[in-house]
Image: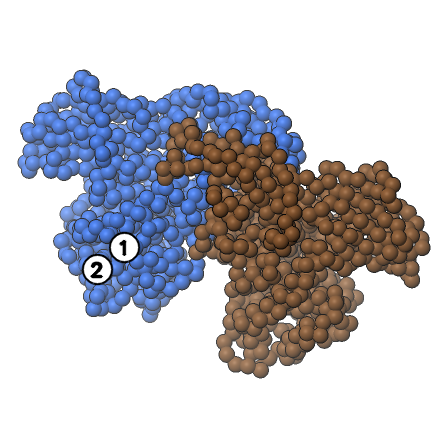
Chain colours: A brown, B blue
């Protein structure tokens, strides 16, 4: 599926034209490429950066490969070539390649499973190689990956060495490498790593809990998400992949329990996951602070990738719902409109002050010392079309709505092609035009978004009275002919949303959503008042207004409320009820922008959850 | 001032009879004493624990010294003796003593100012020595301290070596050592350490900010509290001590700005300070999460010690107000009723689940791997009477109310003695009986607690119409005679308290206070409902009821409210406003206990801030 125009078309263009060249410059400047050059014997000097620097190179290569698959690019192809040659030159004869354990720690291969990230880096190499092979048909990178994977298969396994990757990633990558190559050894090794896990083999680690890296509970017994949010979800993605290949029910049951734990206890409204700066970890149930939210961009991407695999495993729309929520909010917030500035941490509120002690704050950075997120965004955006539609023998399933062209071979030699035209998510109208019908009946499935309360479907202009099936999809069975048209209108109304009463950070508050987009108040739109003092009048209407020139083109929401004058508190933090209750409030109009678009103007305050006027103290 | 009976008398007894013996066992078990034995050449083996293990021994010695001063004790004296001999045996000829830098890192003295804690340990040695000398009149420990201090004076200084202690503590200790010995070199060295600070000499450190250890801004320019909460406040305590000896206005101005920053931006209602688990640090203004609160016991103690010095510097009751709030809540919560279990972290809410990834949770521990807090509580409780009253040439000032006897020599040879009788904080009646009047007129000053809204004062039965002066005290000038009586009644009514609107963790909520005591709801009193689902009806009365058999004797508060049935949410975390608004609520009565007394029964949920019934969504 090729995305065309609209929000995602624009983001993909920026990703290709701005972010990827920027990323390559950053990989050069930060030392990622020099590290490989030293490992290859082509340069001298000191290794720079954390142990997993190679993985950022691989993620960039994966992103560039997806881009080349989207549209040929001489410049990207030319940029990839020396990187691939560099990895090849750095690779040892036995297949191993890892600049950290070749340069500063040459004698310590496989001595630090907990934090060494060797298998994590290997996994990203495999994913890049699969993308590159699919994009180009050439094996220059796939060959490197296979030699490394073969070495891993010779090293680890039931009758060989035990090992538990401290940072999961290689599991899903090995399954993908199996799919691309057909070599079952890779699948078996993925299963081995999954089977070894959860028995405390890694030890208590830096946070005194094997739960930090998902080594506390065996995979098939897992019922919750705990510890490092990216690690946890790269693992569940890998376990779901393993289920997809083995159909072992215990695996699907385990990840289903964990997914339910996510959406019932540990999910931000933006799709962000991982509450804690400390250990970059999931918190306890309902522990979802706003300013202190961690919400690492990579964790949202991991959630998206995992839910995609759950969708493939089950066909249920709730997984596509979470993908949509996460994509439009918690992932897209991770990259600036111009594609060259990034958030590692994605809080739901900011007081607009600079942060000194962590990766948070209200200023996007051009890169990070731990730079996992930027190239992760790049590879996701470059491959985004892969996640929007599926096919099976009976038809096509549209999971996400965007300007796009979808081509499939439902019956060999009889291609089916359809086009989606829409200004989604700003507009709920989606027109599906059949360009080639394929000559035989097939089923067109349309996901009913979880947020949708009303919709109208017309087939060639005639209203179709459809209700979603148990999986959450509208189904249209027909011998589709070229030129036939399905029009869907998802009614898009801005609305106030409330949170489960156990979430303390949203007590007495509302958020604003319209379709899949979560909104926020940002300082730049409220020069006369701090957005931290705004209350929303939930009895007054919300009004949507498209602003094509703002923040790359967004629909803003206007509403009414009050600005609290906290001066009566006179600096005090606490006082008897009512003493300060007469704090003056003056009526104001507020403007909410999509959350993902914050921090693209001057640094300042922002909030997603807004106290309800008249409900405060 | 000797505390007698009541809450503090009981706590001091437990501290003496249970906590101190327990602490000594723990120091033995954890290796603190063995480390010193190895350093002294009396034992072999491996150093155990973090770098600052010696400091816990010193804090225990300080506590035991305060106890011996309170009342002679053969067992405590006998227990101290071998420890002092051990420190003496470990001390090097040049005066240096630090088991970490003598045993595992013998060649690395003064190589890690940021995290080595050598000067921090020295400071605790000095404080213990001062307490021991005051208690016993002997110099066995003071001599060790002076040799070390003299070595420091020969090592560091204007024309000698530069050094900035990564963990402040030695500054206040050196001033105290100066006061005890009269040796001005110690005062000068304290000033030197204060002057060097705030210029980035320590480097960015583990958290990439010299602000973490207060090395970002020169002391005299500081306007806010930042970084590690204990470090920050041990420093401000030392700076205030320096002001008390030098009268340099710029020092007082700086700590006054920082104290104002504390109480207007960074203070929990319990007096707890330091919002963040990450780096044990102060957060941004109004960043005061409940479950995620750090509120290290040591940070509350540091706040108490700092405010005491501010009180000495200014005579203003607001500092005694904060001491009271912190003592009855954020400090006392750090130790169990039985004196043998501790909290390192003091959150304002708990869901009752076990915590796996940090020092938090709802179970008190018998000791900690980083065991700074337990002996810190011990030394504070043992010396508590020192903080309740002061004298000057004109009279006596009562800052805190408790059963106690106060003796002073306002005029040499003409002692003044008074007795306080009260069941404070459970009862607001305080009787001050003059036992010896001293023969000349003097002024009795009574602090008006910041929480007090009404009071009655009677002198020998006759109502005195007094209003507080600008410093916040009632002043009674009189030629006091033996047997004269001042009766004060602070009207104690339970009340709902609200928080500044910028504090998101208290949006739509109230807390309950009565006098200086902050209350909480705990699971053990609410078998039929989770306290996490309780809302308070703020239009219904609160009723105080003394429960002498409960939790060592506490006054509980009964109120009315509702229990929210969250089952209508059916696991969802977010939904359109009103969809779940019909969540059933059933009326309930709740019982609030003093916050400090939580987690003394079975582990379970607790909360301080309670949503207001009818204000939720």
| Residue at mark 2 | B189
Looking at the image, residue B564 lies above or below residue B222:
above
- The kind of secondary structure element at disc 2 is helix
User: How many residues crowd around disc 2 within 10 Å: few (fewer than 14), some, or many (20 or more)?
Assistant: many
Residue at left 75%, top 50%? A422
Quadrant hosting residue A438: bottom right
Residue B580, position as x, y percentages in the image: 64, 31
Image side of residue B559 versus residue B398, left or right:
right
Image side of residue B479 versus residue B454, left or right:
left
- The kind of secondary structure element at disc 1 is helix
Q: Chain of mark 2?
A: B
Looking at the image, residue A567 lies above or below residue B93:
above
Residue A202, position as x, y percentages in the image: 57, 59
Image side of residue B177 versus residue B545, left or right:
left
Quadrant hosting residue A612: top right
Residue B154, position as x, y percentages in the image: 20, 66
**Quadrant containing the N terminus of chain B in the rendered view:** top left
Looking at the image, residue B567 lies above or below residue B47:
above
Numbered tag placed on residue B545 in the rendering = none
Residue at left 30%, top 42%? B304
Numbered tag placed on residue B220 in the rendering = 1
Residue at left 48%, top 37%? A563
């Amino acid at each position: 599926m090729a995305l065309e125009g609209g929000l995602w078309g624009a983001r993909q263009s920026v990703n290709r034209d701005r972010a990827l060249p920027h990323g390559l410059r950053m990989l050069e400047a930060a030392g990622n490429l020099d590290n490989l050059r030293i490992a290859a014997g082509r340069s001298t000097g000191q290794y720079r950066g954390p142990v997993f620097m190679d993985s950022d190179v691989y993620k960039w290569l994966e992103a560039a490969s997806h881009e080349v698959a989207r549209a040929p690019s001489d410049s990207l192809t030319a940029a990839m070539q020396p990187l691939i040659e560099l990895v090849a030159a750095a690779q040892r004869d036995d297949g191993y390649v890892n600049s950290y354990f070749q340069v500063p720690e040459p004698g310590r291969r496989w001595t630090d499973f907990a934090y060494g990230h060797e298998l994590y880096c290997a996994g990203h190499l495999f994913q890049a190689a699969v993308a590159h092979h699919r994009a180009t048909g050439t094996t220059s990178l796939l060959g490197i990956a296979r030699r490394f994977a073969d070495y891993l298969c010779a090293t680890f396994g039931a009758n060989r060495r035990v090992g538990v990757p401290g940072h999961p990633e290689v599991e899903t990558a090995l399954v993908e490498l199996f799919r691309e190559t057909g070599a079952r050894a890779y699948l078996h090794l993925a299963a081995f790593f999954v089977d070894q896990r959860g028995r405390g083999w890694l030890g208590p680690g830096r946070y005194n809990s094997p739960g930090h890296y998902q080594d506390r509970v065996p995979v098939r017994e897992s019922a919750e998400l705990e510890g490092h949010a990216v690690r946890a979800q790269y693992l569940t993605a890998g376990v779901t992949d393993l289920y997809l290949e083995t159909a072992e029910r215990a695996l699907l049951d385990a990840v289903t329990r964990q997914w339910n734990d996510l959406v019932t206890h540990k999910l931000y409204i933006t799709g962000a996951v991982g509450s804690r700066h400390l250990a970059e970890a999931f918190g306890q149930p309902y522990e979802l602070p706003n300013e202190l939210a961690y919400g690492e961009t990579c964790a949202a991407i991991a959630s998206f990738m995992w839910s995609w695999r759950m969708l493939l495993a089950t066909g249920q729309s709730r997984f596509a719902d979470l993908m949509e929520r996460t994509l439009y909010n918690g992932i897209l917030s991770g990259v600036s409109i111009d594609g060259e500035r990034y958030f590692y941490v994605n809080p739901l509120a900011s007081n607009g002050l600079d942060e000194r002690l962590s990766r948070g704050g209200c200023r996007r950075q051009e890169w990070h010392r731990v730079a996992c997120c930027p190239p992760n965004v790049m590879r996701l955006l470059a491959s985004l079309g892969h996640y929007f539609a599926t096919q099976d023998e009976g038809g096509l399933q549209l999971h996400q709505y965007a300007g796009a062209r979808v081509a499939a071979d439902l019956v060999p030699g009889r291609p089916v092609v359809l086009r989606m035209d829409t200004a989604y998510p700003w507009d709920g109208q989606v027109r599906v035009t059949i360009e080639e019908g394929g000559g035989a009946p097939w089923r067109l499935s349309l996901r009913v978004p979880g947020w949708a309360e009303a919709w109208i479907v017309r087939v060639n202009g005639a209203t179709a009275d459809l209700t979603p099936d148990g999986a959450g999809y509208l189904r249209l069975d027909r011998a589709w002919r070229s030129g036939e048209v399905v029009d869907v209108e998802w009614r898009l109304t801005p609305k106030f949303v409330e949170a489960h009463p156990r979430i303390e950070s949203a007590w007495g508050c509302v958020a604003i959503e319209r379709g899949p987009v979560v909104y926020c108040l940002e300082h730049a739109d409220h020069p006369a008042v701090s957005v931290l003092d705004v209350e929303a009048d939930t009895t007054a209407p919300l009004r949507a207004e498209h602003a094509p020139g703002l923040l790359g083109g967004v629909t803003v929401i206007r509403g009414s409320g009050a600005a609290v004058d906290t001066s009566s508190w006179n600096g005090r933090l606490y006082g008897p009820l009512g003493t300060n209750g007469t704090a003056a409030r003056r009526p104001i109009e507020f403007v909410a922008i999509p959350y993902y678009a914050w921090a693209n103007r001057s640094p300042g305050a922002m909030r997603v959850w807004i106290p309800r006027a008249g409900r405060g103290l």
